[in-house]
Amino acid sequence: MMRLANDSLGRLPRSVSRPGYDRAAVRRGVVHFGPGAFHRAHQAAAFDRLLEHDPRWGLTGVSLNSRGVADALNPQDGLYTLALIDTDTEYRVIGAVGAVLTRDEPQAILAALVHKDTRIVSSTVTEKGYCLAADGTLDFSHPAIGREIEAAQAHDWVPSTFTGWLVRGLRARRLAGLNGLTVLSCDNLTDNGRKLEAATIALAQAIDAETARWIADNVAFPNAMVDSITPATDDALRARVSAATGLEDAWPIQRERFTQWVIEDRFAGERPALELAGVTFANEVRPFETAKLRLLNGAHSSLAYIGLGRGLETVADAMADRDLAVFVERLMREDIAPSVAAAPGLDQERYISDILARFANPSIRHLLAQIAWDGSQKLPYRLLDTVRDALAAGRPIERLALPIAAWLRFLTAAAREGRAITDPLATLLLERAEDWRSVLALRDVFGDLGDDPRFLRAVERGWASLEAGSLEAIGAL
Ligand code: CS2
């Protein structure tokens, strides 16, 4: 079977859409760090639609942690298939990614960052890629940041972190007399742009104060909210894509049809007309971010840890478990929603109903185990901030504490069974898991909540309820 590539695009059946623009005329205005599945399902698909109107917004991917995406896409001229899944499946071949660079090509990464066509550096490096402390600022005690500052003293500094590459590239632009640019975070954390701005400037300040000042004056870091459920690629998808396209695609991507991207209209220089691709520009993104992170992602993590504890495999399975579905709806409507300020034009009741319907979509095989990754990085934004708001407002937190108890049980089960977990704090968490109450003392995760008796009591009750296999004990149903 022929490989998907520029030369084989003409072989695609008419049922499969393909780039409607001349790929040879595309200029790469965007350097994206972390071209994983979510980026290729969401942002790259939006830029692909924009390229039909404006050839300046092609993408260069940069993978710092692995070669997998580069090895899969570069032999395909950056092309890949996106499967949009609902009751039926639509296949689109996406051409927005020109090439993927890896950490083995530092000069090529630097050249991309200082190229005259480059206007945006974007990221999906996940929460852990920012090396932030519990208060959202750059964690100077993080080993990677210490190594970065030390390495930066060398004239041939090759960064190893995303923020390190931002400082390296922006310093090179400053020294070359180039314009600033826009750094667009597409990661799931509140105030993602402002936090990335503060972290980048703090790191720059520790390396080269003049560059820190230049960044503050010449680089924009808009906030953004991103949303589309993107299950990991599996062999079943590869087989479906080959059958539909007649071509071999080493790394196709799948996502639900629903997608949303809200970007703060705060750019250094001209911004891409992404509204032509269905993207929303807003003066204030925070209400959309908070609604999505706390309602969707908070519910997602709750379903993941409680569902795994009930032996369930996918989000749809968890929603088919009546007690769990009732619990998560009450959690969203009664415990999370009060902490979410109204977002312009967003009907919160309808938003929650739509999220629950998206979760229940039987066509989407979204593994709870995938959502369970990186709990120490996700739970602070997804649930613990909501707990703090509820405590401050005198609202009950029993249901909110249940997924935290479920995460602790997830950790103790992994430790007891000798299973690895995906989390930057995995070693520390598994060491403490046997005495799970000691996990609550981790200030990098729980901050001040670890000292709050109301929270500790609620987690204890949650643990006992899950131990008894009942969600009713805490009034969850
Ligand atoms: C999920 C998110 O894996 C996870 O943690 O909760 O990737 C979720 O699917 C997206 O944020 C949906 O927009």
Image: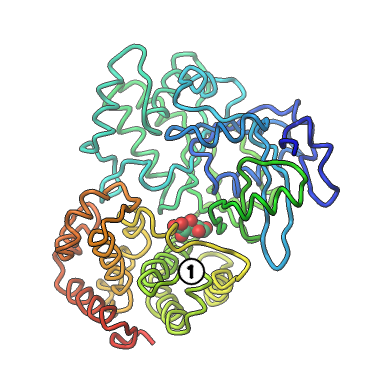
Q: Quadrant of residue 413?
A: bottom left
Left or right of residue 142: residue 250: right
* Residue drawn 37% across the image and 32% down it: 161
Query: Looking at the picture, which amino acid does disc 1 mark?
Result: Ala
Front residue of this view, candidates 466 and 398: 466
Q: Quadrant of the C terminus?
A: bottom left
**Residue 5 point in image, percent of width and height:** 72, 33
Does the beta carbon of the residue at mark 1 sit less than 8 Å from ligand 1?
Answer: no
Q: Position of residue 23 (x, y in %)?
A: 75, 30
Residue 170: % across, % down: 44, 24
Left or right of 441 in this view: 185: right
Q: Position of residue 226 (x, y in %)?
A: 53, 53
- When asked about the image quadrant of residue 393, the answer is bottom left
> In the image, what residue occupies the spot 44% across and 42% down?
125
Q: Is 463 situated left or right of 451 in this image? A: right
Chosen colour scheme: rainbow
Report whether 306 appears left or right of 8. left
Q: Identify the element where label 1 is drawn.
A: loop
Pick the front one: 348 or 17: 17
87 or 279: nearer the eye?
87
Q: Please identify the residue farthest to the top as the structure is shown.
A: 155
Q: Is residue 286 visible?
A: no
Q: Alpha-carbon neighbours of circle 1 within 10 Å: few (<14), some, or many (≥20)? A: some
The N terminus - image quarter? top right
* Residue 171 placement: quadrant: top left
Q: Is residue 350 above or below residue 71?
A: below
* Number of numbered tags placed on the structure image: 1
Q: Is residue 283 visible?
A: yes
> Which residue corresponds to mark 1?
342
